[in-house]
Image (spheres, helix red, strand yellow):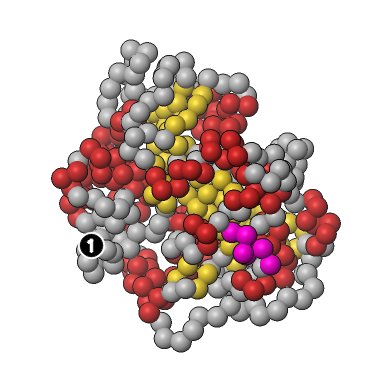
Amino acid sequence: MNSVKLMGTAILSLALATGPVLAQVTALGAGEGEVDIVAWPGYVERGESDAAYDWVTAFEKDSGCAVKIKTANTSDEMVSLMNEGGFDLVTASGDASLRLVAGKRVQPINTDLIPSWGKLDPRLKDGSWFTVAGVHYGVPYQWGPNVLMYNTDVFKTPPTSWNVVFEKMDLPDGKSNEGRVQAYDGPIHIADAALYLMTHKPELKITSPYELNEDQYKAALDLLRVQRTLVGRYWHDAMIQVDDFKNEGVVASGSWPFQVGMLVADKQPVASTIPSEGATGWADTTMLATDAAHPNCAYKWMEHTLNSNLQSDLSVWFGSNPVVAEACTDKSGMQTKEGCTANGMDDFAKIHFWTTPTANCAQGDGACVPYYRWVSDYIGVIGGR
């Protein structure tokens, strides 16, 4: 636990370290024959789920690098896998990326070796979730909001607030929400509660859902304890959540556009919205392991991920937004300008992107509750404490 407590300090220390932090890879050579990737479900498709979605087969043929995938359902699982080693790349969200940097599990990227770097959406190129002291620790991959998914038979009009999953109430069908809503099974969900309180308890003066002082943090935990009495299941497996909405009577939950798309394609009565309070969200980064065994293939893959066709098709498949903005309009793949708008491309300013909480924050040195507390306390909330 002591090493976890030091993460916030370690992240700050990285930014203050003397001497330049340089990329380990200065030139590319021949591919090593494979690349091993830890990825979110649905992020690296080779046509097995749907033949129309395949951005692996052509890469393998052109590069000579066989793509091997290990899926992970939570950021904590990704961090654990990267700590174990044996992987070259990970598609890390913002609540994992700085932990990986602080733990020295990933290395700086040599952007000169990625020809398509200049095509990146300027809003993402220097994101604080993967850039430390001007050094880039990865390549942006996709981004999107954590949406409120709901059953359209229950909600004839979209719910306008996250209160349907945080507060006990009767839903529009006249039945209680008890046992019919879900919440994310990850400590970062504390930020969703904090975001809700930013609107509904302004006296707390929360300015960021990831930077909480003791009073603000306590209020978020209290709200989550109320939610605990309503939640039928805490979800972390996207496919299990899909089944719960189809077969287990779940009618509202925070979710990803991926699950929404799966259920809509299956003709289920499901839609999603970003309520009035806004939403948390994720901006995922492909990060290179410090001890990557296949760095040449890894760099080839990172360049491949910025291909407009891949970015376009992936954003349709996952319901996310491309990090290469032209993929919305250049007709290189299935995505369209309207599709990107539906996925939240124009809502960037409304999204509070996942960021690893640290003790050192804008409220003052040591003023905020660090992530190790989020981990232990959220376990307690789920356990009824």
Compared with residue 262, is residue 329 higher up or lower down, i.e. above or below? below
* Badge count: 1
Asked whether 117 falls inside the magenta stretch, the response is yes
Extreme-bottom residue of the structure: 19
Judge from the rendering whether residue 286 lies leftward or rightward of residue 101; answer left or right: right
- Give 374 or 54, whichever is nearer the viewer: 54
- The residue type indicated by label 1 comes to Gln
Categorize mark 1 by other alpha carbons within 10 Å: few (<14), some (14-19), many (20+): some
Compared with residue 271, is residue 128 higher up or lower down, i.e. above or below? below
Whether residue 199 can be seen here: yes
Estimate the x, y position of residue 207 in percent, counting from the top left: 26, 52
Residue marked by disc 1: 363
- Give 345 or 11, whichever is nearer the viewer: 345
Extreme-top residue of the structure: 174
Helix or strand or loop: what does disc 1 sit on?
Answer: loop
Q: Which residues are magenta?
A: 115-120
Q: Principal SS element in the magenta part?
A: helix
- Give 132 or 104, whichever is nearer the viewer: 132
Estimate the x, y position of residue 282 in percent, counting from the top left: 47, 50
- Give 338 or 140, whichever is nearer the viewer: 338
Where does the N terminus fall, quadrant-wise?
bottom left
Residue 313 figure quarter: top right
Give the residue drawn at x 71%, y 58%.
304
Give the residue drawn at x 47%, y 61%.
127
Estimate the x, y position of residue 98 in percent, counting from the top left: 44, 64
Give the residue drawn at x 53%, y 68%.
137
Estimate the x, y position of residue 328 in percent, counting from the top left: 62, 44
